[in-house]
Amino acid sequence: QQQVKQSPQSLIVQKGGISIINCAYENTAFDYFPWYQQFPGKGPALLIAIRPDVSEKKEGRFTISFNKSAKQFSLHIMDSQPGDSATYFCAASITGNTGKLIFGQGTTLQVKP
Amino acid sequence: GAGVSQSPSNKVTEKGKDVELRCDPISGHTALYWYRQSLGQGLEFLIYFQGNSAPDKSGLPSDRFSAERTGGSVSTLTIQRTQQEDSAVYLCASSLGRQWYEQYFGPGTRLTVT
C-alpha cells in the first residue's frame, strides 16, 4: 500500500514533442505528490509538486495532472527539449508525517534533437 | 548558502568492512533524510532526523545500518560488515522543518562493495 508505481520505465521523444509520465498509488492518505528530475551524477531536484485539492498545476513547460478518484497523477513536459533528457521520479508523502517520500521507480527520458 | 554536500563521492570497500558516509545539510535545515538508490531503482527511504533525533528509522534494512546526527547539522550513516547488496548510491536530503516537503538532495555517495 506504500508503493508508487511509475510508467513507462523509459521514454524517447522528439524535440518539440510532449513527454508524458504516469504514476499510480494506493494509499489514500498520501496528500503531497512531487516530481523530481535527476541528471547523471547529480542528486534529484524538485521540479514541481501538487496536492490533491487541485486537478492540475502548471509551471512553465511542466504540468502535473491529478486524478484523485483514480489515484493517478502524471507529468506532462510540453515542447520537450534535449536538455530535458534526464530521469524523472514521481513521489508521494503524507502531510504531518515524517515527510519521508515514497518514490516511483523512475523514468529515463531521452529527447532527440 | 551552499547546497547539501556529501562525502566521499565514491567509496569502494571490501565485503565485511565498515563504512561511514557523511552528509552536510543546508545551513538552518532542521530535517535530514537518508535515501538509497540502487541501480535502476527508485529511491528508498532509510531514516529521518528532526534535529538530532531520529523519529523514523523504519527504512533501515538491517541492524548493520545506523545513523547519527550531531549539533543539528552533520549526519553520518554507518554500514557495518558491508555486503555486496549494500552497493548503491546513498543520498542525503535536507529541508526546513516548517517546509518539510521541499527536500533538497545532495549529489550522493556511490558505494561499491567488492
Image (cartoon, rainbow, N blue to C red):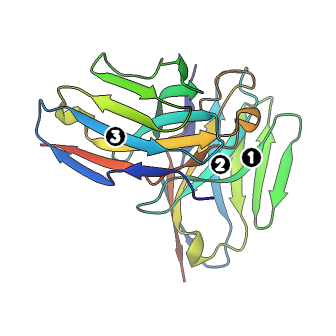
Amino acid type at mark 3: Leu
Of the numbered discs in the image, which one, if any, rests on residue B105? none
Q: Is residue B38 visible?
A: no
Amino acid type at mark 1: Ala
Q: Chain of mark 1?
A: A
Q: Give the label, 3 or 2, closer to the camera.
A: 3
Disc 3: which residue:
B21
**Residue A94 falls left or right of residue A102:** right
Mark 2 touches mark 1? (CB < 8 Å): yes
Q: Residue at x 76, y 33 (%)?
A: B98
Query: What secondary structure is marked by label 2?
Result: strand
User: Residue A31: where, in percent of width, then height?
Assistant: 76, 29
Q: Residues within 10 Å of mark 1 (few under 14, many from 20)?
A: many
User: Residue A59: where, in percent of width, then height?
Assistant: 80, 61
Q: Residues within 10 Å of mark 2 (few under 14, many from 20)?
A: many
User: Residue A94: where, in percent of width, then height?
Assistant: 70, 25
Amino acid type at mark 2: Trp
Disc 2: which residue:
A35
**Image quadrant occupied by the C terminus of chain A:** bottom right
Q: Chain of mark 2?
A: A
Q: Nearer the viewer, residue B98 or B103?
A: B98
Q: Are marks 3 and 2 on the same chain?
A: no
Q: Nearer the viewer, residue B2 or A13?
A: B2
Q: Residue at x 74, y 34 (%)?
A: A32
Of the numbered discs in the image, which one, if any, rests on residue A49? 1
